[in-house]
Image: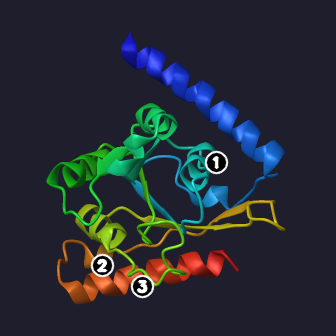
Amino acid sequence: MKKILKTIGRGIVKGAIYAYCKIVYRAKVIGKNNIPKKGQVIICGNHKSFLDPPLIEVTCGRYTRFLAKEELTKSKFLAFLGHVFDAILVKRDSKEINAIKESLKTLKNGYCLALFPEGTRNGLAKGEQVKDGAAFFALRSGAPVIPCGIKGGEKGNWKVTITYGKPLDFSEYKGAKDKETLDKVTKEIMDKIIDLTK
């Protein structure tokens, strides 16, 4: 019963967020057809604002779980969204085993995992080092990566455009654990994301 109520609540919240994004930000979606309708997949986007996770959630057309920093639970509203959308909480700058296992389980079960390689909002602009989490999960699971570029939504340009790129296949590196390969895959993912924000 709880699962049914949660599913209903998720649908209601998604509908409300979608309406909000369309009315307030005139959200436009490009390339949604690039996202596989079934099977494991990883969506990676740039991180501009608090709007990014729910925007991806309501536009990708898939049941999606986000990797989110544990600190979001300090905000009742964000904690609520995290609960409704089954977020996978992780401690920042920590290789938390439970979060890794839950993420890999999500992919193994044929669902969608979403994360932001920047690790924090406007990470590139702040000079933050891009995290290799997306590359790690892609190489461990063999899941294709969908790069996602989000632009707009700021003062002077409120209209938001979210663009999903073509799947990136890194199956040739599946199982690789060396830093050189992880860095190479991470760079390719981030370069594609940046291209989609132009």
Q: Nearer the viewer, residue 167 or 59?
A: 59
Residue at point 73%, 46% (across, down):
21
Q: Quarter holding the C terminus?
A: bottom right
Q: Which residue is mark 2?
A: 172
Q: Which residue is mark 1?
A: 59
Q: Residues within 10 Å of mark 3 (few under 14, many from 20)?
A: some
Helix, strand or loop status at disc 2: helix
Residue at point 62%, 81% (across, down):
195
Residue at point 83%, 43% (across, down):
23
| Percent position of residue 126, x then y | 50, 80
18 with respect to 56 (left or right)? right
Give the distance between the C-alpha atoms of the residues marked 3 and 2, in whole angstroms: 16 Å
User: Type of residue at label 3?
Assistant: Lys
**Residue 125 position (above or below residue 24):** below
> Mark 2 or mark 1, which is nearer to you?
1
| Percent position of residue 7, x then y | 48, 23
Q: Nearer the viewer, residue 107 or 190?
A: 190
